[in-house]
Amino acid sequence: MHLRSIVCIVLSLISCSAFSEDYNVKTFGAVSDTTQLSTQAINKAINACSGKGGGRVVIPAGQYKSGTITLKSNVELHLERGAVLYASTRHEDFPRQARPAYRSQKDPGGWFALIYAEGQKNIALTGAGTIDGRGAWQMPRPELPGGDLDGRPRNVLFISCQDVTVLDVSMRNAGIWNQHYLNCEDVIVDRIRVYNHANRNNDGIDIDGCRRFVLSNSIIDSDDDAIVLKSTGREGCSDIVINNCIASSFTNAIKCGTESTGGFRNITISNCVVKKSKSTTPPIFGRTNIGITAISLEIVDGGIMDGVHVDNVVIEATECPIYVRLGNRARKYMEGIATPGRGIMRNVSISNVIAHSAGNYTSSITGVPGSKIENIRLDKITLINQGGLKPGEYIAHAGLVDEDEKGYPEPTVWKNLPASALFIRHAEDVSLSNITIGSQAADPRVPLIGVDIDRLYVSSLRNRSNPEAVKLELKDVRFKKIE
């Protein structure tokens, strides 16, 4: 080997060693004592690490209390196994961050979070330790608007960051959303465990206006939405992969929406299980202890949904297995901008879904008059609901189903629709193939209803409970092929 090559290798090893240097937060004054704050010590360690070009800041086994920790470029914050990072519950320990350049409908004028980063590159949050937001004790700030803008801190908030890695960490008990990735690029979140049943708006993970994002091999159990893609600002979600996850929620397990300003493009959701939450406490913000929906795809604040594929999902208990909604709530993401127009939803594929022990909120695919969902395909779908309804416990016929164009997009608006398995309205190029439906107890409703559809293709529709039952009720369907 040439001397020049040897020198290059040695210099490379030295460089890697310097970059991967560990900075133990105890060296900077952090203490394993939840009666004392370690905020300053942890931030000192991050600043020292960043000042040397980057490396790893280590929180060793023990119990630590902190206010806002600000992560910086080229820094990995590593929680060792046995380390628990508790959030302080005092407002003064979470100073309001300067309002970022990227504007979002959820921004109360400057954010609050336990672990925060804005505009940073090559950052990581890793380790087998735990982040506990002590959400039950996180109180609203009286000077702020109410609802989800009341200043309760997120456990993790990264805004406009690039090259983000989150591995192995357990997260629980956030004041509001557990982790929020806003306008970020090139993100990998893998092997995380989330349990979030402590306060209102307790989402599990919010992927908001991000590009090139992979979430995989994770278990998420939340009071509010578990895995949710949003677009609360001008940027949409694009090139997103969600794979090999188990999601539980008292509201919606896997969801695109409700905010949809920038839309959703090239989204793949596969190999997931939706199951009942293991929480034994009543819902705080959710409306049902088996969950409202398993899969929700929504465009209601403008934006375009184009190219969404959901495949290989098993659903154990939820009120409504599949909810696809094109509405027109038309909410602005910030003041002083034009009201968004109607959005577009097209090229959606849902396949290999098995839903058993579902409630009686019917799966639905619904646009609004003048705005149809375009090119949607359902293949190899099994929908088994509870049944047992009596007249008066469901909407009697399709003409009585409210359009609710401006309303909040959720099947709780309609509850028990006139179809037992699937209700489709205002759509075009709809393909249904290899659909199996059934009810655990007798259900008097028509299994499938279609209204105002251009081009409907149905192949192999089977009623497991009653093979002789009327399968379809169609009105204003222009061209249909039924086999």
Image (tube, helix red, strand yellow):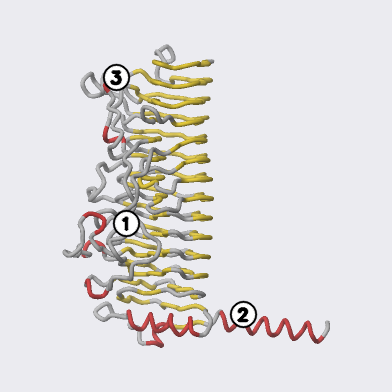
- Amino acid type, callout 1: Lys
The residue most toward the right is 2
Residue on which disc 3 sits: 399
- 2 vs 3, front mark: 3
Q: CA distance from mark 2 to mark 3?
A: 68 Å
Determine the residue positioned at 51% across, 60% down.
185
Name the element at disc 2: helix
Mark 1 neighbour density, 10 Å: few (under 14) some (14–19) many (20 or more): some
Residue on which disc 2 sits: 16
Residue 106: image tag = 1
Q: Is residue 328 left or right of residue 198?
A: right
Mark earlier in primary sequence (2, 1): 2
Name the element at disc 1: loop
Counting from the top left corner in percent of width and height, residue 381 is at 48, 30
How many marks the image carries: the answer is 3
Q: Is residue 372 left or right of residue 95?
A: right
For the residue pair 452 and 213, the one nearer the viewer reads as: 452
Mark 2 neighbour density, 10 Å: few (under 14) some (14–19) many (20 or more): few
Counting from the top left corner in percent of width and height, residue 385 is at 35, 29
For the residue pair 324 and 277, the one nearer the viewer reads as: 324
Screen quadrant of the N terminus: bottom right
- Amino acid type, callout 2: Cys
For the residue pair 180 and 195, the one nearer the viewer reads as: 180
Mark earlier in primary sequence (2, 3): 2
Q: CA distance from mark 1 to mark 3?
A: 36 Å
Residues at marks 1 and 3 touching, judged by CB atoms closer than 8 Å:
no
